[in-house]
Image (cartoon, helix red, strand yellow):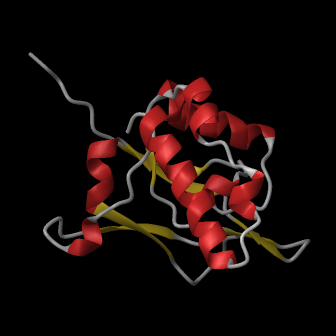
Amino acid sequence: MNCVLLFIILGDFNGHSPLWGSKNTNLRGRQIEEFVNTHSLCLLNNGEDTYFHQRSRTFHSLDLALCTPSLAPYFNFRVGVDLRDSDHFPIFLDRVNVGSNDAQRPTRYLFHRADWTNFALRALITRNMVEGENLNEVVNLVTKTIISAADDSIPK
């Protein structure tokens, strides 16, 4: 008998990473990134800040929502606006109608299974590519090159 494990984890992870909206990465953030990649989990966060640091009067994203890939299309991450008596904003997962276009999540690469040698060869950005006069064309060409290299080297 096959048993499919489905789960959602929400919590204050106290880790910083650009993957969920932080400006920098700390040790805990790297550990969380590794855990997410190793277990092929999906991060539902949308980059919004979830925490207000009273002393420095700065906002951060410390609260995360992780889930198994098959659940990701069913939920949208949302941050509430009222701190109440906390320094953390409430976080919500709103159920999405999977028949609607809102349920379409971007494809997630399985970085821990990547062929990085192949990626490095295919993602080669040459001087010719970046010396164009039209910045939009240069950006589009570099972006297409990287995405093509990822599609050919990293499973989804």
Q: Residue at the location (64% across, 47% down)? A: 13
Q: Residue at the location (60% across, 28% down)? A: 116
Q: Quadrant of the N terminus?
A: top left
Please indicate whether residue 145 sits to the left or right of residue 74 in the image. right
Residue nearest the viewer, comparing 144 with 150: 144
Residue nearest the viewer, comparing 137 with 14: 137
Which residue is the extreme one toward the bottom? 81
Above or below — where is 142 with respect to 114?
below
Which residue is the extreme one toward the left? 1
Which residue is the extreme one toward the top? 1
Residue nearest the viewer, comparing 91 with 39: 39
* Quadrant in which residue 56 is drawn: bottom right
Above or below — where is 111 with respect to 96?
above
Residue 49 visible somewhere in the drawing: no
Residue 90 visible somewhere in the drawing: yes
Q: Quadrant of the C terminus?
A: top left
x and y percent of residue 82 in the render? Answer: 58, 83
x and y percent of residue 64 in the render? Answer: 55, 54
* Quadrant in which residue 6 is drawn: top left
Q: Residue at the location (71% across, 38% down)? A: 30
x and y percent of residue 113 in the render? Answer: 48, 25
Q: Residue at the location (61% across, 24% down)? A: 117
Please indicate whether residue 118 sits to the left or right of residue 120 in the image. left
Above or below — where is 22 with respect to 150?
below
x and y percent of residue 92 in the render? Answer: 43, 68
